[in-house]
Image (spheres, rainbow, N blue to C red):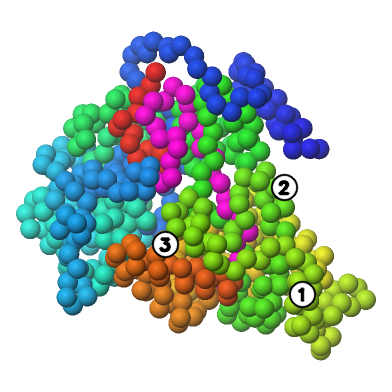
Amino acid sequence: MTGKVRRAALFVALVLAAGCAPRPPANSSEPTTTAPATISGPKRAIIVANTEVDFLHSSNIGGRPELRLLVNPGLAVLDDRGGLRPVLAEAVPSLENGLWRLLPDGGMETTWKLKPGTHWHDGIPLTAADLVFTTEVGRELAAFNHQAYAAIDAVNAVDDRTLTINWKRAFISADALFSGNDGVTLPLPRHLLADAFLTDRSSFTENPFWTENYVGAGPFRLRSWVPTSQIVLEANSDYALGRPKLDEIEVRMIPDDNTRVANALAGEVDATIGSLGSIDQAITLRDQWRGGIVRFRFETNAWIAIFSQFVDPHPAIVGDARFRRALLYALDRQSLSDSLQFGMGPVGHSFMSPNQPAYAEIEAGLPHYDYEPRVAERMLAELGYTRGDDGVLRSAANDRLEVELRTGPVEQAARPGAAIADYWQRMGVATSYYRMTPQQQQDSEYRSTFPAFTVLNQANDVMGFYNLHSTRAPLPANRFRVVGGFGNVGRYMNSELDGLIDRYFMTVQPPERIQVLGPILFHIADKLQLMGIYYNPRPEAIAERLVGASRERTGGQITWNAHEWDIR
């Protein structure tokens, strides 16, 4: 069945699921202009999420950042071009405005000044004491910890509106503190959480505050919460940037891909957060939806990559970079993207995503491993492997070349995993393919001790660099647990790379930081401790009637400016 036939069949099923949704023209990729309807009653937008969401904004536990921005954007927010804009603060610290100072001893000082009259949703003033409390939570509780806290020496509330932070060493994301960017904890209301923090820290993340009792300081406040089903938010008239234009936002939690797409076709979706659906479904919606548009964005936290094992790998040849290079030459990654991503995801030659400013310049100078099976065969022969009568490569000691390839349980990783195993089998590498269950993926020891290779959908952003550091390796000494996600998946430990990563996070000036970024990316592309397959485009649906939402974003979350949204 061809791709076009599959999408046509899928569309018929979706229309039936949507009830009486009409069939729009098949050749339209942009919304058709219609006369604006008259809005009567409260102005209301509907956001659809693919999983159950909550407001827990730790650096390591779920929830959706798009939802958190609606209720608590923090002191600054990452806009649609990747720049930080002040929200609850008067200004974002920078070297230019003097609120970020580099000290002679290698440390730093940053100053935050809260806007006057900033309040929590319950009317209590938000003060510098709340920010001191937030830092204390981040330092003490692993679920809220972040690499930024290790660089902080002291946090001082100068007065109710002024906070100074003294840093032991330079740290590039100092201006993102209290913004939720890169997983840094957003401001926490001390008056509501201090008692829980002091009396029972073990159950702090289970506090009903994170669900039905949430209080933030953002453009919308929580009105009602129906677990696994619906969240209703209402406009906050006391918001620091002014009352939102919308009166209400309803967040619907719909886990089924077909149902989400069917809801869009039926006119019941203004925007999506999380996964819209598979690439097939997203393309179908893009081609058939008259009420809105579907954009494919390259996030800095989504690519499909093969991670190699570096602690007691089996077979031992997995630890040889020459072997890993041969395996990558054996993969037709462009064909994988064409067949599994409809060509929407470029080949992952670099750890960076295509939307990052320095991508083109740096990526051009990195080693590339295009599909060249003859090169792969020659390299394997140079390593001493010859084909046996059964077609499987054998070592000089007549041992069969056998590797295990695991994937995560989600389709994004499982589908390319099976195809990769097939390519390697054709090359003579006996590859056993295994798809982990969700329970196995959550078992940190099992997940970390894979024998040879594992395929995952992982972050390739700044936090992704951090996770390549030796200190992030899950080992018996730390009970295979690291703060913040899966950490250093392959447990690759290299002092040269560690030094580059440390230097990167300590280089405040962007031009000098880019000079460090190049060697980091070259090291990854040369040593291939992880091998990029393709970038994973994220489909995002936005209704035509939703005015003010950024449709051509290169950064930030869709809800970064939700207070400016309107409905027509």
Rendered location of residue 294, percent (x, y): 54, 33
Sort mark 1 into few (<14), some (14-19) or many (20+) by Cα contacts within 10 Å.
some
Which of the two residues, 155 or 232, is positioned nearer the viewer here?
Answer: 155
* Left or right side of 435 for 5: right
User: CA separation, marks 2 and 1?
Assistant: 26 Å
Q: Earlier in the sequence, mark 1 or mark 3?
A: 1
Q: Is residue 552 magenta?
A: yes
Q: Amino acid at mark 2?
A: Ser
Residue 445 seen anywhere in this rendered image of the structure: no
| Cα distance between the residues tagged 3 and 2 | 30 Å
> What are the residue bounds of the magenta stretch?
529-556
**Residue annotated with mark 2:** 339
Q: Which residue is mark 3?
A: 463
Q: Secondary structure at mark 1?
A: strand
**Residue 21 visible to an observer of this rendering:** yes
Identity of the residue drawn at 39% across and 10% down: 38
x 21%, y 35%: residue: 241
Q: Within 10 angstroms of label 3, few (less than 14), some, or many (20 or more) residues?
A: some
Question: Given the current orientation, which residue lies at the most extreme left position?
Answer: 159
Which mark is nearer the camera, 2 or 1? Answer: 2
Disc 1 marks a residue whose amino acid type is Glu
Task: Please name the residue that numbered disc 1 is placed on.
Answer: 402
Disc 1 from disc 3: Cα separation: 33 Å
State which tag comes first along the sequence, 2 or 1: 2
Residue 366 within the segment the image draws in magenta: no
